[in-house]
Amino acid sequence: MEITTDIYLGDSKEQLKLLPENSVDLVVTSPPYADQRRNTYGGIHPDDYVEWFLPISEQLLRVLKPTGTFILNIKEKAVKGERSTYVIELILEMRKQGWLWTEEFIWHKKNCYPGKWPNRFRNAWERLLQFNKNRKFNMYQEEVMVPVGEWANTRLRNLSETDKTRDNSRVGSGFGKNVSNWLNRDKTYPTNVLHLATECNNKSHSATFPEALPEWFIKLFTKEQGTVLDPFMGSGTTLIVANRMKRNSIGIDVVPEYCEMVKQQLRPAELYLLEPKTEYEQAEP
């Protein structure tokens, strides 16, 4: 089967209505943060952010498959020396919509410049919130395993009797570990902290994230021929990575220049530039 990439030009809130329900395996996106990207997207005041985003998340809930996952890259800003609460408020309101807030990943920006403000240090991380429609969803954990690392050389050298059994957590969490399980293993499962450098070579968009970021989540939550959606496509990083990984993809953006740029970057892939329509349909190539 051929891999397709569909690009919609227009407001995400309206363009998402054109997509069939239960048709997307993974949503990975980074919408404009409150009062950010003002020149490109107009900016949304922190007090209005939740009200602005909820119609979009409502449509994402509709188009996502029951086994699908929504990854939201977002971070609250500081206002008058205090962190805004719009991210927390958004999570609570999305739960009322029917979303399950199942996990939170941290993107640690390895190449973040050091620095400070009068009452805080420079941001070196961002949130990646995971939402699902159901408690059982597709997740392929073996696809993102990492090398065990040098810690095993010393930690596994002399195992105690406790290390050879499922030793329950001392804090009463119900979780336990058997350290001996790591003997003779080359790989292990990662943590929920992703150590990735920011993208520095793409100057065509005001907030480009590294290709490794969507790639990691595409590996974790989809298989080949699956469908990945980015309703705030920007420079098209998610779509470009999905195309390379043999996933179908859908991108939406309100800026014509970005839509045309991504279209050119993805040639000669089968791709359609979809103008705003009253119903879902593919345009002629």
Image (cartoon, rainbow, N blue to C red):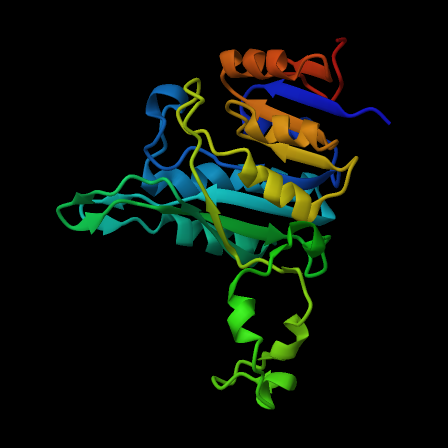
**Residue that appears at 69% across and 50% down:** 143
Percent position of residue 203, x then y: 41, 19
Q: Quadrant of residue 22?
A: top right
Instruction: Answer above or below: position of 9 versus 66.
Output: above
Instruction: Answer above or below: position of 120 versus 59.
Output: below
Mark yes or no: residue 109 visible: yes
Q: Quadrant of residue 43?
A: top left
**Residue that appears at 58% across and 25% down:** 252
Pick the front one: 204 or 282:
204
Percent position of residue 282, x then y: 75, 17
Quarter of the picture containing the N terminus is top right
Percent position of residue 71, x then y: 56, 45
Pick the front one: 137 or 63:
137
**Residue that appears at 69% across and 68% down:** 184
Left or right of residue 2, residue 182 in this image: left
Pick the front one: 79 or 97:
79
Q: Residue furthest top?
A: 285
Mark yes or no: residue 249 visible: no
Q: Residue furthest bottom?
A: 161
